[in-house]
Amino acid sequence: MNQEIVKPGVIVPILTPIDQNELIDEKRLREQIDFVIAGGVTGILLFGSNGEFYMVEESEMERALKITVEHTKGRVPVFFGIGAIPTGKCIRLAKMARSFGADAVSVLAPMFIRPTEEELFRHYSAIAGAVSGFPVLIYNNPGRTGYTLSAGLVEKMAHEIPNIIGIKDSSGDLTQTEEFIRRNRDIGFKVFAGKDTLIYASMCCGAVGCVATTANFVPKEVCSIVSCFLEGDYKKALEAQYRLNPVRLAMDKSSWPVSTKDMANMVGRDVGKPYLPNLQSEGAVYDSLLSALKKAGMI
């Protein structure tokens, strides 16, 4: 198993451009891949939360993965996001991801239901076991699932399931992020900040980077936080974090996850609309997003 594909840096949960029929727009997807790689990202995550995975049919996921792997051409690793609830479907998607050239999968804890820790351990163990030797990242996002993965459970999975090699923590709880790092630092377990506002703080505790949606539209600015930190220029890294924060916080004013595409369009990306029933931001919300980008000097 190649653990080196999980490198320190910025993984972008790449947005999913769609056409008028809500099918993936191949041309725009290829352009977005080139844009984020040119901006310095060290990995691309297909069908993360801001990639609107919950809207996409499996056949379209397969098509997008084939396009991404072919177009990326090994420039950066390709991660495939899995957010299904049934264990069996997660296994099917993980096998598909491996078959069509993804470098790893990221598996969100099941939404809507509220599994016990034993059920969660068996869920992740079954998925990882079905793609033995293939890297698996845990994705902890209590804001979307309704519960958080405990530090004890993550420690058990990290130590007992060989191909679980890291976690994206979107809890926003720095103590929990610290515990994920502290309890698993003996095995080189990789922890990525999942909150764009906590990249610097998480790296101070030992995180290796972030999975940041803002890298869809200001990748250079996001990557500068991580690169400056890794170079030891902590003051510059912190200033870059403070410059990003108002932009990320402004995104919360729109319906989720509309603002990622809104802001990408604002900076000239032409990525189109979100899947229905979501709509593009309008009026005061749109103005506040645009204002945040302008005040940060990102337009």
Image (cartoon, helix red, strand yellow):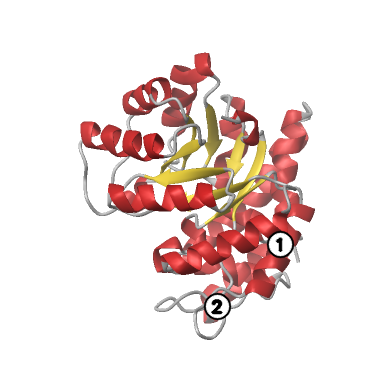
Q: Amino acid at mark 1?
A: Lys
Q: Give the answer, above or below, for where 190 lies relative to 130.
A: above
Residue at horizontal 33 percent and vertical 53 percent from the top: 89
Regarding residue 15, the answer to whether it shows in the image is no
Quarter where residue 164 is shown: top left
Percent coordinates x, y for residue 36 in the rendering: 71, 56
Most foreground residue, 261 or 26: 26
Instruction: Indicate the amino acid at tag 2.
Output: Lys
Instruction: Find residue 295 and name its label.
Output: 1
- Structural crowding at the residue carrying mark 2, measured as other residues with C-alpha within 10 Å and reported as few (<14), some (14–19) or many (≥20): many
> Is residue 96 something that shows in the picture?
yes
* Up/down of 220 relative to 59, above or below: above
Residue shown at 46% from the left, 75% from the top: 275
Q: Residue furthest top?
A: 186
Vertical order, 55 against 238 (above or below): below
Q: Is residue 236 left or right of residue 44?
A: right
Circle 1 packing at 10 Å, graded few (<14), some (14-19), many (20+), is few
Looking at the image, which residue is at 63% across and 68% down? Answer: 263
- Helix, strand or loop at label 2? It is loop
The nearer-to-camera label among 2 and 1 is 2
Whole-percent x, y for residue 111 in the image: 30, 52
At mark 1, the secondary structure is helix
